[in-house]
Image: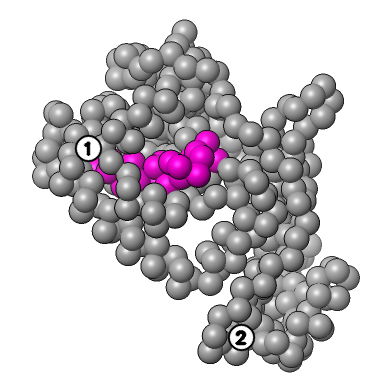
């Protein structure tokens, strides 16, 4: 509200403007979940918009692998868009382009995900495509050999990304002796030896109804997504309600990886916390945001993201820092005993002369 006094327009006091802004109504759509008799789950949130994102989340990642087949989940994800028994690779690409959709996939330590972004009117076609690439991929030998080279090049790129290298070594040390310690891509010898039979066996073992969730958000109707799940994923083999994995034990460690010719250091600290299912995880996510990130190339001063950033900016040699909150699933080992798999990373780039002044700043924070 504005008032006119003596010909001047007076604006509301700043504190009242802030209060009005804070009082805005926020729309949180309800999450609706349905479980089919096969164990296949459907989760939706309807935001009443003309577009949607829909995908299949599968409990299949490097955590469910062993040293012999480590890297298979990632290799299989690479094979997803090479054609199916119903669609050639070219036909698949043209169909996705014709409806203006975006099709993608990724693999993590605990999940493999295939998803599409599309108009709400094209949801059925998108689900049809997703089910086709999951259940009917050709996996022919020529494509496997071609993709093998792509994955090996990807591994070379990862090895040049020191952030990725630090994260992999953190997992190797913190979860020593557990599948969580293995990389997502797998070792070179596995990438070179994976064949069609290995991929087919992996699908039959892990792509089970009880280990899948069809999730959709945007302009979606829950009953319609349930109908599509029954139509396109109804033929899936029944599976366990949850994937079986070895509970992890967090092990404190210290790892040094010398790289000849480098005069700088990438370092990280990791502390044990809780799993993503624990109620305290929300507080840790807030803490992660408050700590935030900072890079010297962006400058600092009154606009620095935090007091920590200001103090680090004044420390000689510190180049950047970033906080990470990486959580994993929890599994009951014994009654009232839980295996909490959680990593809280601080990634820092600094010169060796700064290492002794850096650690106290984080501990004080």
**Is residue 359 or residue 314 the one in the foreground?**
359
Is any atom of residue 51 visible in this view? no
Residue appearing at x 61%, y 73% in the figure: 257
Asked if disc 2 and disc 1 are in contact, CB closer than 8 Å, the reply is no
Q: How many marks?
A: 2
- Give, as a single range, the part of the protein colored magenta: 61-81
- In depth, the one of 2 and 323 nearer the eye is 323
Tag shown at residue 265: none
Density class for disc 1 (Cα within 10 Å; few <14, some 14-19, many ≥20) is many
What residue is drawn where x is 55% and y is 40%? 63
The image quadrant of residue 73 is top left
At mark 1, the secondary structure is loop
Q: Residues within 10 Å of mark 2 (few under 14, many from 20)?
A: some
Q: Is residue 351 above or below residue 200?
A: below
Residue farthest to the top, as pictured: 37
Residue 11 image offset from top left, x and y in percent: 69, 67
At x 39% / y 67%, what residue is drawn? Answer: 156
Q: Position of residue 132 (x, y in %)?
A: 25, 29
Q: Position of residue 76 (x, y in %)?
A: 33, 41
- As for residue 65 lying within the magenta part, the answer is yes
Residue 139's image quarter? Answer: top left
At 34% from the left edge and 14% from the top edge, which residue is drawn? 234
The residues bearing labels 2 and 1 have C-alpha atoms spaced at a distance of 44 Å
Residue 335 percent coordinates (x, y): 82, 22
Q: Nearer the viewer, residue 10 or 48?
A: 48
Quadrant containing the N terminus is: bottom right
Label at residue 264:
2
Magenta residue check for 234: no
Which mark, by number, is residue 139?
1
Looking at marks 2 and 1 on the same chain, the residue that comes earlier in the sequence is marked by 1
């Amino acid at each position: 509200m504005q008032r006119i006094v003596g010909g001047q327009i007076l604006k509301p006091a700043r504190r009242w403007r802030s209060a009005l802004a804070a009082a805005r109504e926020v729309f949180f759509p309800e999450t609706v979940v349905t479980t089919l008799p096969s164990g296949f789950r459907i989760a939706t949130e309807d935001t009443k918009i003309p577009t949607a994102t829909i995908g299949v989340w599968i409990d299949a990642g490097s955590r469910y692998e062993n040293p012999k087949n480590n890297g298979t989940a990632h290799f299989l994800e690479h094979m997803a868009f090479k054609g199916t028994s119903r669609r050639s690779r070219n036909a698949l690409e043209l169909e996705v382009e014709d409806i203006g959709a975006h099709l993608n996939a990724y693999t993590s330590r605990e999940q493999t995900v295939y998803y599409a972004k599309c108009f709400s009117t094209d949801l059925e076609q998108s689900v049809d495509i997703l089910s086709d690439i999951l259940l009917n991929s050709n996996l022919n030998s020529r494509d496997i050999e071609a993709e093998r080279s792509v994955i090996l090049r990807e591994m070379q790129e990862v090895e040049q990304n020191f952030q990725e290298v630090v994260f992999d070594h953190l997992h190797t040390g913190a979860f020593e002796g557990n599948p969580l310690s293995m990389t997502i891509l797998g070792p070179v010898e596995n990438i070179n030896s994976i064949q069609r039979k290995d991929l087919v066996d992996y699908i039959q073992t892990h792509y089970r109804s009880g280990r899948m969730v069809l999730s959709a958000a945007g302009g979606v109707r829950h009953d319609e997504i349930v109908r599509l799940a029954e139509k396109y994923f109804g033929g899936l083999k029944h599976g366990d309600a949850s994937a079986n994995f070895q509970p992890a034990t967090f092990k404190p460690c210290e790892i040094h990886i010398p790289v000849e010719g480098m005069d700088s250091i990438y370092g990280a600290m990791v502390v044990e916390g809780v799993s993503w299912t624990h109620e305290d995880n929300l507080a840790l996510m807030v803490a992660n945001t408050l700590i935030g990130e900072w890079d010297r190339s962006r400058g600092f001063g009154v606009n620095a993201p935090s007091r920590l950033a200001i103090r680090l900016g004044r420390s000689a040699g510190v180049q950047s820092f970033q906080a990470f909150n990486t959580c994993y699933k929890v599994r009951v080992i014994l009654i009232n005993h839980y295996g909490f798999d959680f990593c809280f990373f601080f990634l820092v780039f600094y010169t060796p002369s700064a290492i002794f002044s850096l650690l106290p700043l984080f501990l004080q924070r």
